[in-house]
Image (cartoon, grey):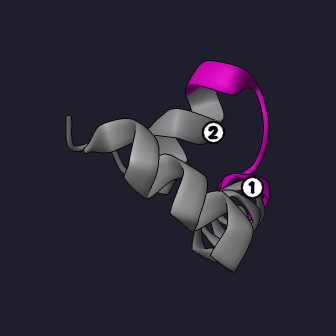
Amino acid sequence: YNYTLEEVGRKFGVTRERIRQIEAQALGRLRHPSRSRKLRDYLS
């Protein structure tokens, strides 16, 4: 799927800036060493 931050924000009733913040937070969590290791193990 290819949605803009604006489209996602409209869908959830928040601003595109808030969507950007949530996205950055989620990616940061996925990049955390212990989480990424667990995720890598799960996906392999």
**Badge 1 amino acid:** Ile
Quadrant in which residue 21 is drawn: bottom right
Q: Position of residue 6 (x, y in %)?
A: 51, 49
Q: Considering the whole magenta stretch, tell me its main secondary structure.
A: helix
Image quadrant holding the N terminus, namely: top left
Q: Nearer the viewer, residue 26 or 33?
A: 33
Residue placed at 55% from the left, 64% from the top?
A: 36
In the picture of the structure, the residue carrying the numbered disc 1 is 22
Q: Which residues are magenta?
A: 11-19
Q: Residues within 10 Å of mark 2 (few under 14, many from 20)?
A: some
Q: Is 2 on the left or on the right of 29, as rendered? A: left
Q: Is 1 on the left or on the right of 42, as rendered? A: left
Verify whether residue 21 appears in magenta: no
Verify whether residue 15 appears in magenta: yes
Quadrant in which residue 18 is drawn: bottom right
Q: Nearer the viewer, residue 32 or 21?
A: 32
| Disc 1, SS | helix
Q: Does residue 5 sit above or below 31 in this rendering?
A: above
Q: Position of residue 44 (x, y in %)?
A: 25, 44
Q: Is residue 42 visible?
A: yes
In the picture of the structure, the residue carrying the numbered disc 2 is 9
**Badge 2 amino acid:** Gly
Q: Position of residue 34 (x, y in %)?
A: 71, 67
Q: Nearer the viewer, mark 1 or mark 2?
A: 1
Q: Residues within 10 Å of mark 1 (few under 14, many from 20)?
A: few
Residue placed at 79% from the left, 38% from the top?
A: 14
Q: How many marks?
A: 2
Residue placed at 60% from the left, 30% from the top?
A: 10
Q: Position of residue 28 (x, y in %)?
A: 69, 73
| Disc 2, SS | helix
Q: Earlier in the sequence, mark 1 or mark 2?
A: 2
Q: Is 6 on the left or on the right of 32, as rendered? A: left
